[in-house]
Amino acid sequence: MKQRKQVGAIAYQDDTSSGLRILLVTSRETGRWVIPKGWPMKARRPHQAAAQEAFEEAGVEGRIGKKATGSYHYPKTLRNGDVVACRVKVFPMKVDRLMGTWPEATERRREWFSAEEAAAAVQEPELAQLLRSLGSLLDAPVKSATSK
């Protein structure tokens, strides 16, 4: 089976009072907790496409890392019922702005989690590991670009 590529964003906030918080959204089909992700976009670099998905699916804007922090695999069910293997390249995104309304607001829920809660909430083991390790990954210098 051919593996398809996707890009995703781990939207996060890190402050002294609440610590590291990760924003997850529900998937449209099953309602399970996921990170904002989607197919690559022709006119955008991978990190820019991930930032666009974060805006459309979670209503966030911020600074997204230009370098992926890792990737994970999952089986995606397409609209026609076919299942394809996907590899998602994941980019960290420091959230600056949470929108009140956004393109997919009526189709998804969003919620802040601690890294450990986020890891427990997602079904993909590789994604859970990325979420757990986000804090140590962020301690390394991150090159970022502002979205929007």
Image: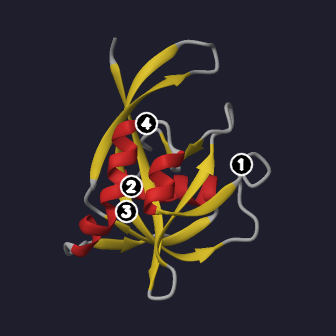
User: Gap in Å between the C-alphas at discs 4 and 1?
Assistant: 19 Å
> Of callouts 2 and 3, which one flags the residue occurring earlier in the amino acid sequence?
3
Between 141 and 125, the one lying in front of the other is 125
Residue at 61% over, 13% down: 81
The residue tagged 4 is: 124
Q: Is residue 128 above or below residue 147?
A: above
> Of callouts 3 and 1, which one flags the residue occurring earlier in the amino acid sequence?
3
Kind of element beneath mark 3: strand
Residue 98 % position (x, y): 63, 73
- Badge 1: how crowded within 10 Å, few (<14), some, or many (20+)? some
> Of callouts 4 and 1, which one flags the residue occurring earlier in the amino acid sequence?
1
- What amino acid type is highlighted by mark number 1? Arg
User: Gap in Å between the C-alphas at discs 1 and 2?
Assistant: 20 Å
The residue tagged 3 is: 92
Which corner quadrant holds the N terminus?
A: top left
- Badge 2: how crowded within 10 Å, few (<14), some, or many (20+)? many
Q: Is residue 38 above or below residue 115?
A: above
Residue 15 % position (x, y): 46, 84
The residue tagged 2 is: 131
> Of callouts 1 and 2, which one flags the residue occurring earlier in the amino acid sequence?
1
User: Gap in Å between the C-alphas at discs 3 and 1?
Assistant: 21 Å
Check the image and name the residue furthest to the right.
106
